[in-house]
Image (cartoon, helix red, strand yellow):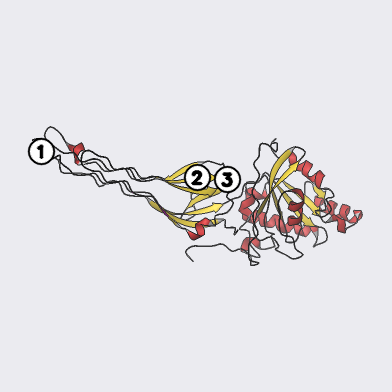
Amino acid sequence: MHFLDQSKIFLRSGAGGPGAVSFRREKFIQYGGPDGGNGGKGGDVIFRAVPGLNTLIDFRYSQHFKAKRGGHGMGRNRTGAAAEDLIIEVPVGTQVFDEEREELLADFTEEGQEVTLLEGGMGGRGNASYKTSTNRAPRQHQPGEAAQEMWVWLRLKLLADVGLLGLPNAGKSTFINAVSNARAKVGAYAFTTLVPKLGVVHHKGREFVIADIPGLIEGAADGAGIGDRFLGHIERCRVLIHLIDIAGTDPVEAMRIVEDELAAYDDELAGKPRLVVLNKVDQADDELVKAFSEELLAAGADRVFAISGMSGDGIDRLLDALLSYLPLRTSTETKAAPVLAEEETNEPAKPWNPLG
C-alpha cells in the first residue's frame, strides 16, 4: 500500500433541475390550466471522516468529483427528483484547503464527522407556481440554480498522542517496534523510514498512539534529505520524543540540528513538550551515558532518558514519563490505530502534484 498525504481534486455540486412548462389537456375538461412541476435539488458535495483509512492514495487515481443534477419538473404537477448527495470518504486527520492553500475549509479530527463543502442548486419553479388570478396561463419557468465548483487541496495529518523524531538512523523504527504493534522496517543505513507510521502502545493499563516520521537532517526546512514535509503528521501530538544515537554524532549537535529544523518549520511545533532520549546505550558504558546526559541538560534539555530499543533497557521508565503528558484513557477506550505500510520503492517520497 502506498502512502500519500496530499492531493489536489476538483469538486462540483449538482445543478438544480429546471421547472416545467406544461398545461393540462384532457378530454371533457374545458379549463385545464398550467400544471408544470418544479425541478429537483442538485446533489451536495459532502466530506465524511471514516475509520480504516490512513492514506489519500485513492485521490491519486480519481481527481474529479461531480454530484448529479436535480431532475426536470414534469407535467401533472410532478416535481423533479432530488439528486443524491456525493459523499467523499477521507481518513480521520484530513484537512481541506482552498486552491491557493491559504484558507482551511474543513478539518476532520473525529470519526463520522461530516462537512458539506458545496451545496447543490435549488430546483427551478414550474409554470404552475406562477399561476395567479390575472395570469391564468403563465409560460415562464426557472432553469434551476447553477452548480458550484472549486479545486481543493487535501492534506492528511495523522492523529497520534506521541511523536518520534530524530536524525536518520537514530533507532526510531527499532523503538516503535519494541513498544507498539508497529512493524517498521529496520536497517543499518540512513532513511530506512520513508513514510510515517503509527503504532499503539499498551502500558500499565493505559493506551496511546505513537507516530514515527522519517529522519530529519540539517537543512530539512530547505528540502535537504526527505525535507520537513512529514512534520505535519506530529503537529497534533501532545508530546514529542527526540531520539539521539549515543554511538553516532555529538549528541548536543544532534539535538541542536533537530531543534533548529523544528523552529524553522513552525514555532508552535517547536514549543511542544519534548523528552530527549539517548538511544543505543547498550553500546556505551555508564560513564559515557552520564557525561552525555549532563551535556544535554546543560544545552537546554528538560529531561534526558537513557534507553536501548534493542534490549529494552530504560523503556519502561520512559513510558512512565509519557503517561503524565497524556489524558487518562484505558485500552478499551481507544481503537487500534492502523499500521502504515512501507513504500514499495526505495526512493525517497516526494510531494505529488496532479497538475505535474
Q: Residues within 10 Å of mark 2 (few under 14, many from 20)?
A: some
Marks 3 and 1, how far apart at CA? 60 Å
The disc, 1 or 2, on the residue closer to the chain's N-terminal end is: 1
Query: Is residue 66 found inside the magenta-colored segment of the image?
Result: yes
| Quarter of the image that includes the N terminus | bottom right
Note whether 79 is above or below 247 in the view shown: above
Q: Is residue 21 left or right of residue 322?
A: left
Could you say where residue 195 lies in the image, as x and y percent from the top left?
64, 58
Would you name the residue on which mark 2 appears? Answer: 48
- The kind of residue on which mark 2 rests is Arg
Task: Place residue 40 in its image quadrant.
Answer: top left
54 vs 127: above or below: below
How far across and how far down the image is residue 284, in percent?
Answer: 88, 58
Q: Earlier in the sequence, mark 3 or mark 1?
A: 1
Query: From this viewpoint, which residue is outermost toward the front?
Result: 27
Which stretch did the figure color magenta? 65-69
Q: Label 1 belongs to which residue?
A: 27
Element class at badge 2: strand
